[in-house]
Amino acid sequence: MKLAIAVVLALSGVPADDKQDLSKAVQKFVGAASYAFKGETKMDSPLGNLPQQVPALEGSWEKEMGLRATLGDRGEFFRQGDKFFVKQAGGEWQRLEDAQAPPAEGARPRGGRGFMQRMVRNLKAPHEEVQDVSKGFKALKKEEKREAVGEKECTVYGGELTEEGVKDSPLGKMLGQFGGAANATLSGSAKAWVDGEGNLLKYEVSNRASLEFQGNPIEFSLVRTTSLTDVGKARVEVPDGVKKLLEDAPKEKPKTETPGKDEKK
């Protein structure tokens, strides 16, 4: 089995050791009970109504508690299993399905709820996202020069993403939500920083899209960098407002069997 894997990697142009070293670091991180993270996204767009920089996404995840994060000064969200809660700036905690995005100053509200629901539901925790990234490499190369992340010297792995890897990337998903992915030419690459003890400390996904908008060719680029800290040490506290919503949630009624037609009453 190991020989078969080595042959596949050799034929694909990916050095087996590089792929295996990165895979070990990713799996080590994915298996952690908790961690803290900060994700920064920079977007370059010719359209004036799109933000040039998305607010930082910062938070923690704990296996037994869930995911809690803030989106700059715009608000906060919490996820536990398949339940999503949001707290917009100056507001109270709400179930995601009940939340309505406030309109920007001077703008009329349109589609705010649907956009917010799609955005929050499509957000992945880093341990989920990094698995997609690591699987999406077309080719992988270990860079000769090491780089520091904080006080740790790291080996840097990087390479181009496959077509599927690009579609699963942040910009690919964003365009897909608005029906633009089919008409766009997408490309992407990714990097990962691993320290001497085999710990994944940072990863980055870069995307570029070319498409036509109202008959004009335009290009977007998006770079998302996620830093990982306190692996195995971070703790997540369920907000009081979310606790109340969970307590007030209607209990599911036990299912009762309906007698079949052939059964005698």
Image: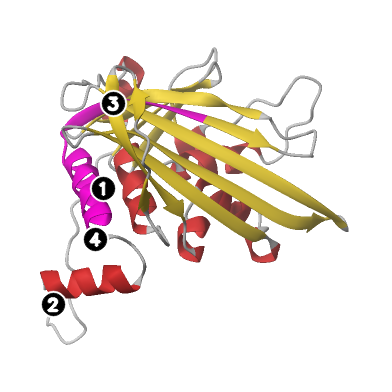
Amino acid at dot 1: Leu
Amino acid at dot 4: Ala
Does 146 appear above or below 36? Answer: below
Say how many tags the image has.
Answer: 4
Does 152 appear above or below 139? Answer: above
Q: Is residue 197 magenta?
A: no
Does 129 appear above or below 257? Answer: above
Q: Disc 4 designates what residue? A: 16
Q: Is residue 65 left or right of residue 131?
A: left
The span shown in magenta is 16-40
Frontmost residue, 181 versus 165 = 165
Asked if disc 4 and disc 2 are in contact, CB closer than 8 Å, the reply is: no
Q: Is residue 105 left or right of residue 10?
A: right
- CA distance separating discs 4 and 1: 10 Å
Amino acid at dot 2: Lys
Q: Disc 1 designates what residue? A: 22
- CA distance separating discs 4 and 3: 22 Å
Q: Position of residue 185 (x, y in %)?
A: 66, 61
Which image quadrant is residue 222 in?
top right
Residue found at x 51% / y 57% = 166
Frontmost residue, 147 versus 45 = 147
Earlier-in-chain disc, 1 versus 3: 1
Q: Is residue 27 magenta?
A: yes
Q: Residue furthest bottom?
A: 262
Q: Position of residue 235 (x, y in %)?
A: 21, 20
Asked if disc 2 and disc 1 are in contact, CB closer than 8 Å, the reply is: no
Q: Disc 3 designates what residue? A: 153
